[in-house]
Image: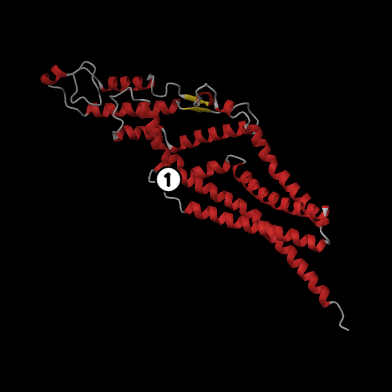
Amino acid sequence: MVKKFLLVASSSLLKITLFSLALTGAGWMVFGTSDKIKQAAEENSLYDSAVEIVLENAKEEALSGNEQLPLDNPEIQAAAENAFPPELLSQNSGSIIDGFYTWLAGETPTPQFSVDLTDAKQRFADGVGDYAVKRYEALPPCTFAQLQTLSPDVDPFSVDCRPPGLLGSTIRERVVTEILNSEEFLKDAVFTAEDLPKDEQGRTIAQNFEAAPDVFSALRLLPWILGISSLLLATAVLFLSEDKRKGLRRIATTLLGTGAFLAVGSLLITYLFNQMNQPKDAFQSSAAGVAKSLAGEYNAALMQFYIVYIAVGAGILLTLWYQNRNTHTSVPKV
């Protein structure tokens, strides 16, 4: 009775460990390093579409105090895109992702990264300055009547004429200096993990999730633990069975059943992702593409497990069938 109970328990646990091994193993193959995430972001043009977000958040909000700057102007937009190209976003985003992974791996006590936007700020200021000069020098000289209504602080982006004595080089220098010395626009051009948002208590992400590196380390070992456990449970099923043939048949059917269940689940995940509505927003569309790509990578990794399960299970059953067939055909007829 005890032997039968242990057999049933071992068989049930074998199904659970095989299933868990496939899920965690596939997860580690995809998310164990930052490579798949960065690759999916590049393939789905996430950094290209993120330029719009940068323009809105890093400049429109940052320059909210400078109402004179026409952010909707195509020339200003071009200067912004030149200052914050997708390559810059890709490089900096990649360094941030890598910084979090080194923290999760326990190599650093906190996420470590440094994003230096000093050159980007300078390029943006130069581009805006060039546009200001181009616009200003194309204006006609001011008439006497216009000079009477002209403000002493000439706005190069809205002025309708060129007052005497005000050179284009002076306009450019003033615009560039204002942007570089702006208290709103990238005041701290070097962005580190310390600049990440904190909670109401002032705690950082590393402090709120201080157990994350331990969890990550445990997840790294989990596939190995589950793999060894599966082998031990399969051995227990084999020796607790009435004979080895029945034990092998039980192991084979467990492998086939688990593999088939995983295959159906993988197809279901693919179907659900294909049924997702495509967002109209470019950035959201790219983000959805990243999620779909990572799901595809996960399914591909999962496929390796359930194909092995099904192949090994089918191989055991075919071997047993072949041996049984040879046994019957080798018995001499009386």
Residue where numbered disc 1 is placed? 285
- The image's colouring method is secondary structure
Amino acid, disc 1:
Ser
Identity of the residue furthest to the top in this view: 152
Side of 54 relative to 172 (left or right): right
Decide if residue 205 is on the left or right side of residue 174.
Answer: right
Q: Residue at x 71, y 61 (%)?
A: 253
Q: Is residue 46 left or right of residue 136?
A: right
The answer, for residue 44, to whether it is visible in the render is no
Where is residue 327, by image quadrant? Answer: bottom right
Q: Is residue 242 visible?
A: yes
The residue sitting at 35% across, 32% down in the picture is 79
Instruction: Say which of 216 and 297 sits in front.
Output: 216
Please provide percent x and percent y for residue 187: 42, 21
**Which quadrant of the rendered structure holds the C terminus?**
bottom right
Secondary element under disc 1, as helix, strand or loop, is: helix
